[in-house]
Image: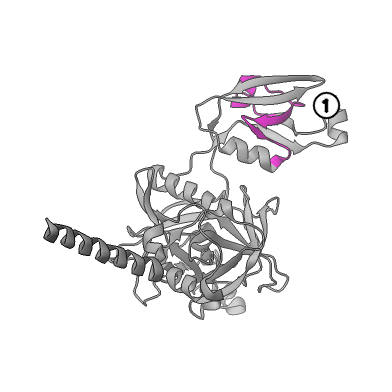
C-alpha cells in the first residue's frame, strides 16, 4: 500500500510540474478552445475575459503568435481590350490599349486549419487568378468560396498541410485605448507589423459598406494591408483591416477594421450556405427630421421614418405605410437608419418579428415576416488599401 501511494504522489507531482511549465511558457495552449461554426468550419477562439496587457510590456509574443496565419494575396485579372483596339488608326494614335493584365495586392487571415481564409471582397473581386503566399514562403492557388459585398468580406480556401490558424478573439470586449497590432503586406514589401490603439468603436455612416460597425485604429494601415489582421496584445484576431481615411493614399492614423464578431457571421454563412442570409422588409428609410415629420404628419421625436414601401413586400404585407416611424425591431432600438438596417438584417428570413412604430400620434406594434435580402451591387469606394 505504501508503495502505491508513493507512485501516486510522484505521478501527481510530475503532472503539476508539467502544468506549471505549460501555463508559464505557453498559456494559450490552456486558454484557447476549439469550436465549430455551425458545424461547418473549425476555428479556435480565445476565452472570454482574456487579459489585454502584454507580458513585460512587449508585443513580440503577440506578433509571433499571429504572424504565421497572416498571408499575402496576389490577384490577376485579364486585360480588358478597348473596343477599337484592332483599328489600325486607333493603334497608330493611341498605341496598344489594355494588353497588360491587371494585378492586385492584399492580405488575408487563415482562420481554420482546414484552409479557410478571410479577406476583403475588394481584394479578390473580379480576379481570374488568386495566389496566396504564407509567411513561411509557401504559396498556392486559392479559390473563392463566397463573397459578401455588404460587409466587404470574402472567404477563400487553400489546400495545404500543416496550416497555422489564428485564434479568434472577442471584439465585443474591446475598449477604446486598448493596444492593437495590424499585420499585413503593405506596398508588397513583405509582412509588416504596426502598433497603435483602438481609437473608437462602432464607427458607421462612413459610406464604405452597407453594414458598418468599424473598429477605428491609429495603427498604420497602407495599400496592401486590406484583409490583414488587427490583433490584440494576446495575438488574437479582433478585426479584418479594410479601409483608411487618407488624402494622400497612405496612412494618416485613421484606419478601419471589420470586427471579428461580424466576420464570424459572414464566415459561417458563406461556408454553410454560400451566402449570408439577412432579413429584408422592402422599405425606404430616412433619418427623422422636423421637415419629414411635418410632411407626413407624424408626432415623433425619435426613430426612423419610412418614406417608401415596396408594393407586396414584407413590410407592405404587414401593414407598414409611408410616414410610419419605426422605433424598435424586437428589443433593439432604431434611432437611425444604420441601426434599423442592422436590426432588420439580423432577423431570420421567414420568421416574424415585432416592430414598434408610431403613426401620426398613435403608437402601435406590428408583426413583420422578413424576406431574404437581395444581393447588393458592389460599390467602388476610395481609400480602400488593396
Q: Is residue 318 magenta?
A: yes
Quick check: can you spot residue 104?
yes
Colour scheme in use: one colour
Residue nearer the viewer, 193 or 118: 193
Vertical position of residue 135 compared to residue 214: above or below: below
The quarter of the picture where residue 362 lies is top right
Measured from the top left, where is residue 96 in percent x and y? 53, 76
The quarter of the picture where residue 28 lies is bottom left
In the displayed orientation, state which residue is furthest to the front.
Answer: 2
Instruction: Please report the residue visible at 35 percent of the width from the left and 66 percent of the height from the top.
Output: 20
Measured from the top left, where is residue 46 in percent x and y? 45, 56
Vertical position of residue 278 compared to residue 22: above or below: above
Measured from the top left, where is residue 13 in percent x and y? 26, 64
Q: In the drawing, does residue 12 fall left or right of residue 209?
A: left
The quarter of the picture where residue 309 lies is top right
Q: Quadrant of the N terminus?
A: bottom left
Q: Which residues are magenta?
A: 309-337
Vertical position of residue 346 compared to residue 78: above or below: above
Residue at the disc numbered 1: 296
- For disc 1, the neighbor class at 10 Å (few under 14, some 14 to 19, many from 20) is some
Label 1's element?
Answer: helix
Quick check: can you spot residue 131?
no
Residue nearer the viewer, 21 or 149: 21
Instruction: Please report the residue visible at 68 percent of the width from the left and 23 percent of the height from the top.
Output: 320
Measured from the top left, where is residue 133 in percent x and y? 40, 72
Instruction: Please report the residue visible at 51 percent of the width from the left and 70 percent of the height from the top.
Output: 104
Q: Quadrant of the C terminus?
A: bottom right
Amino acid at each position: 500500500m505504501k508503495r502505491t501511494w508513493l507512485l501516486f504522489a510522484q505521478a501527481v507531482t510530475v503532472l503539476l510540474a508539467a502544468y506549471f511549465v505549460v501555463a508559464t511558457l505557453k498559456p494559450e495552449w490552456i486558454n484557447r478552445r476549439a469550436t465549430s461554426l455551425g458545424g461547418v468550419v473549425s476555428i479556435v477562439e480565445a476565452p472570454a475575459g482574456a487579459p489585454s496587457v502584454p507580458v513585460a510590456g512587449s508585443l513580440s509574443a503577440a506578433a509571433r503568435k499571429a504572424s504565421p496565419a497572416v498571408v499575402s494575396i496576389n490577384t490577376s485579372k485579364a486585360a480588358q481590350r478597348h473596343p477599337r483596339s484592332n483599328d489600325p488608326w486607333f493603334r497608330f494614335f493611341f498605341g496598344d490599349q489594355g494588353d497588360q493584365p491587371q494585378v492586385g495586392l492584399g492580405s488575408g487571415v487563415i482562420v481554420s486549419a482546414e484552409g479557410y481564409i478571410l479577406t476583403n471582397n475588394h481584394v479578390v473581386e473580379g480576379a481570374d487568378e488568386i495566389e496566396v503566399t504564407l509567411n513561411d514562403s509557401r504559396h498556392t492557388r486559392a479559390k473563392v468560396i463566397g463573397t459578401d459585398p455588404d460587409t466587404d468580406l470574402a472567404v477563400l480556401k487553400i489546400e495545404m498541410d500543416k496550416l497555422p490558424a489564428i485564434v479568434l478573439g472577442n471584439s465585443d470586449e474591446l475598449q477604446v485605448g486598448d493596444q492593437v497590432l495590424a499585420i499585413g503586406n503593405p506596398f508588397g514589401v513583405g509582412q509588416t507589423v504596426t502598433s497603435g490603439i483602438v481609437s473608437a468603436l462602432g464607427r458607421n455612416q462612413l459610406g464604405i459598406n452597407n453594414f458598418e460597425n468599424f473598429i477605428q485604429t491609429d495603427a498604420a494601415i497602407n495599400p496592401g494591408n486590406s484583409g490583414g489582421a488587427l490583433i490584440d496584445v494576446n495575438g488574437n484576431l479582433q478585426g479584418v483591416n479594410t479601409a483608411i481615411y487618407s488624402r494622400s493614399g497612405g496612412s494618416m492614423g485613421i484606419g478601419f477594421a471589420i470586427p471579428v464578431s461580424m466576420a464570424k457571421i459572414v464566415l459561417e454563412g458563406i461556408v454553410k450556405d454560400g451566402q449570408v442570409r439577412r432579413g429584408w422588409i422592402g422599405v425606404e428609410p430616412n433619418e427623422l427630421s422636423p421637415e419629414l415629420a411635418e410632411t407626413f404628419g407624424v408626432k415623433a421625436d425619435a426613430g426612423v421614418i419610412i418614406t417608401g414601401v415596396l408594393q407586396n413586400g414584407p413590410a407592405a404585407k404587414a401593414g407598414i405605410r409611408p410616414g410610419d416611424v419605426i422605433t424598435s425591431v424586437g428589443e433593439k432600438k432604431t434611432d437611425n437608419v444604420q441601426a434599423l438596417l442592422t436590426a432588420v438584417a439580423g432577423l431570420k428570413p421567414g420568421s416574424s418579428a415585432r416592430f414598434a412604430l408610431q403613426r401620426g400620434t398613435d403608437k402601435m406594434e406590428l408583426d413583420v415576416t422578413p424576406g431574404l435580402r437581395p444581393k447588393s451591387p458592389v460599390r467602388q469606394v476610395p481609400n480602400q488599401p488593396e
